[in-house]
Amino acid sequence: MSIQLNGILRENGLDPKDVRLVRHKDQRSSPGRSPYELWRDDPKGFHDYQSSQRVSNRKKFSAPFWAVFVVDAFDDTVFVGLFAASYCGLLEEDRPKPHVIGEIDAAGSCDIYDLELDNRLEKLIGRLVIKWGPGERAWVQYADRQDKAIIELRARESEPPFPGYINFIEPLSRIGKLPAGWIEVLRSARGVYILTCPRTKEQYIGSADGVDGFWGRWLQYFKTGHGGNEGLKSRDPSDYQVAILEVAGTAADHDAILSMEGRWQRKLQSKEMGLNRNVAKSK
């Protein structure tokens, strides 16, 4: 028999009728940090982020209530705290948005809630993985109407497991914010990757064989916007999606990796229909 979230709430003296389930999943494309990254790296920023809501959402948060907050951590939805919540009033002065660089919440544009962390579920923070289920767009739900299944109870708070080279797909803007374990995996691997522009859908095929592997090469693109490539220099910067096409074996030398790169460029015609302009050279 599976474990359900409402059972855990009841065992800790909470009536699911009094509990809101709030899922932080920010899909905007502006540069900044995801809710998971805020929670992991900036507790104050995360508190500011979750304590403010648009005025249009006020009906969802009427009266004092208990809030179970979860964040999307890559492919998992992870419990990050039980809070006693109550309405304070409108935001009194302009405040930078903690998750979007260069944007602000203007005074009077959103409601502010007082959130007090409750310690009854403290030992489950970062360890409880919840199946959100149907209604993905409904980011606020009533616990008594949506009893969530528990997928996993981790032995300790941990970062999500690396998805594997073939399944790895991320925007360049997140390369410097990946979990430490992921960065180490990507630094130790070399091979061929693909960049895809989210605006034009054009592709660039490149190879990584430096000391910091894929991660080091992608970090160059993030810092410069082009990584030294003529095709990328000739256009406006973009938050390219990065993915791995092929991982080189430990015995592969520089020439072997360049050969792999050329093969993928021919397969995907990235010179004829994509962004490859440079003659293959050391990367």
Image (cartoon, helix red, strand yellow):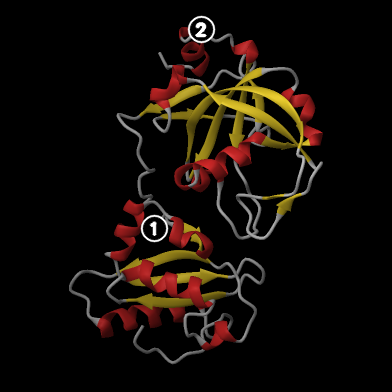
Place of residue 281 in the rendered image (x, y in percent of width and height, measured from the top left): 37, 89
Specify the farthest residue to the front: 93
Camera-nearest residue between 22 and 152 = 22
- Horizontally, residue 15 falls left or right of residue 229, namely right
As drawn, the label of residue 166 is: 1
Discs 2/1, front: 2
Q: Residues within 10 Å of mark 2 (few under 14, many from 20)?
A: few
Camera-nearest residue between 51 and 28 = 51
- Horizontally, residue 85 falls left or right of residue 121, namely right
Q: CA distance from mark 2 to mark 1?
A: 44 Å
Can you tell which quarter of the image residue 265 is in? Answer: bottom left
- Horizontally, residue 39 falls left or right of residue 49, namely left
Place of residue 23 in the rendered image (x, y in percent of width and height, measured from the top left): 59, 34
Tell me if residue 33 comes above or below residue 233 in the rendering: above
Place of residue 188 in the rendered image (x, y in percent of width and height, measured from the top left): 27, 64
Camera-nearest residue between 211 and 205 = 211
User: Mark 2 falls on what kind of element?
Assistant: loop
Q: Earlier in the sequence, mark 2 or mark 1?
A: 2
Camera-nearest residue between 1 and 6 = 6
Place of residue 130 in the rendered image (x, y in percent of width and height, measured from the top left): 48, 28
The residue tagged 2 is 13
Give the total number of marks visible in the rendering.
Answer: 2
Q: Which quarter shows the C terminus?
A: bottom left
Tell me if residue 242 comes above or below residue 64 in the rendering: below
Q: Amino acid at mark 2?
A: Gly
**Going 35% across and 34% down the picture, which residue do you hit?**
157
Q: Amino acid at mark 1?
A: Ile
